[in-house]
Image: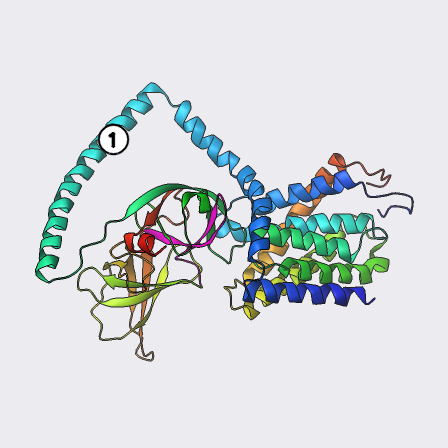
Amino acid sequence: MVSSGEDQPSLPALALSVILAVLLQVYPLTGALAHWRPDFLFLVMFYWLRHFPFHLGLGFAWWLGLMGDIAYGDVLGRSALAFCLTAYLLHLLQQRILNYRAFHEIWLLIPLVMVSQTIMLTINVILGRGVVWNAMVLTAFSSALAWPLLKLILAKLLPTRQPGV
Amino acid sequence: MGRKWLFALVSVVLIAVSSQTALFAPVRQWLASVSYPFYWVTAIPARLSEWSDDTLASRAELEADNRRLRSELLVSQGRIQRMAELAAENVRLRALLNATELLRDSVMLAELVGISPDPMSHIILVNRGASDDVYVGQPLVDSDGLMGQVVEVFDNHSRVLLITDPSHALPVQVVRNGVRAIAEGVGNKDHLRLRFVAPTTDIVIGDMLVSSGLGGRYPVGFPVGRVLSVDDKTSEAFLEVEVEPSARIDRSRHLLLVFTQSTQAGR
């Protein structure tokens, strides 16, 4: 699952996956559907952090979050904060999840998405903006559903010399 | 691991500065031009389907469409004639009252190019910006009623806050009797709520609401919505009134930006 030390994350692959995620993130959805949008940027962050835990860290997560904020065109730093704190949690759990089977990743992904969503919603509350609390559960659920597919696509699209994937 | 606190601190500072001050305004202009292509790309499917509807339509469909539009035009022209008569009468009456002449608004066609990905904020992007003389606070309407107001203007596009956003409120009046109220968004595309309506107010289900122009932001008389339900809870000090927006908030793609004469003169 996790790459050995020699493997380097390739920059074009990284950039491509991030652009893809931002496109999916801003794709226009209206009404109830909008609440069901998986957090694609988060999934991409999860993917790269799981594959290159020794190369990519909090800084990567922070930049990715900032990218999301820029795409949203709203408050800067909201996703950045959520992403870098979640990445830190993932970092703390890294030793424990080294041997997880692919399927079990979902049980790690769901709570992490919920943590990240909770942080963003809390910031919304502090700023006095509208909040839909069940968005947290819906996003976590849809992200978990989208994860296997996204992972498959990323692995096919961006060969990273992974024997295990 | 002190770095995480550094990142967290920088984020918090960013959040505070970008949400509470205008310090980042120039940066946001630049960032908007970075993010706009993404919205442009994601709008391609909608544009493509519209294009194929336009170009691949059969002759029979086009003829049917043409017939329908002709009859609609006839009906609208009939209405406009009545309107012109009423406007003339209105001006005459106002002249009698020594009031200022009624403002006539001009409009500009705009197209929806993006929807805010955040389901909690009802914000859309339209393809007109500073180069088309769009200004902050400008009202946006669709064919059926008031949609919202421009909150941020960039070079070639702008962000519009819809009237259904929880942070949006606008002054309205009942067409039937002129009762004034405040219509507030609740974060739901299908209804608005009237705030602080006294239980003795004459307002019933089906009442038509139009903008009252009192805030100075929206011009007078644009349709806002229709009263869906009036709930008189004896335990509450005010009526609970739900309103269904007239504008097709989540369906309209072709919109109109309204230039009001007073604001044009003021700019």
Q: Quadrant of residue B53?
A: top left
Nearer the observer, B260 or A160:
B260
Amino acid on which the number 1 mark rests in the picture: Arg
Q: Secondary structure at mark 1?
A: helix
Residue B52, given in percent of the width and then of the height, sits at 44, 27
| Residue range (magenta) | B146-166
Using residue A57 as the reference point, say whether residue B192 is left or right of it.
left
Q: Can residue B154 be found in the magenta stretch?
A: yes
Residue at 81% over, 59% down: A91
Q: Is residue B169 above or below residue B148?
A: below
Residue at 32% over, 24% down: B62
Using residue A145 as the reference point, say whether residue B45 is left or right of it.
left
Q: Is residue A118 above or below residue B109?
A: below
Residue B36, given in percent of the width and then of the height, sits at 55, 44
Residue A58, given in percent of the width and then of the height, sits at 77, 58
> Callout 1: few (<14), some (14-19), or many (20+) C-alpha neighbours within 10 Å?
few
Residue under numbered circle 1:
B68
Nearer the observer, B105 or A146:
B105
Q: Where's the C terminus of chain A, which quadrant?
A: top right
Q: Can see residue B143?
A: no
Residue B174, given in percent of the width and then of the height, sits at 23, 62
Q: Can residue B156 be found in the magenta stretch?
A: yes
Q: Chain of mark 1?
A: B
Nearer the observer, B62 or A148:
B62
SS assignment for the magenta stretch, majority: strand
Residue at 9% over, 54% down: B92
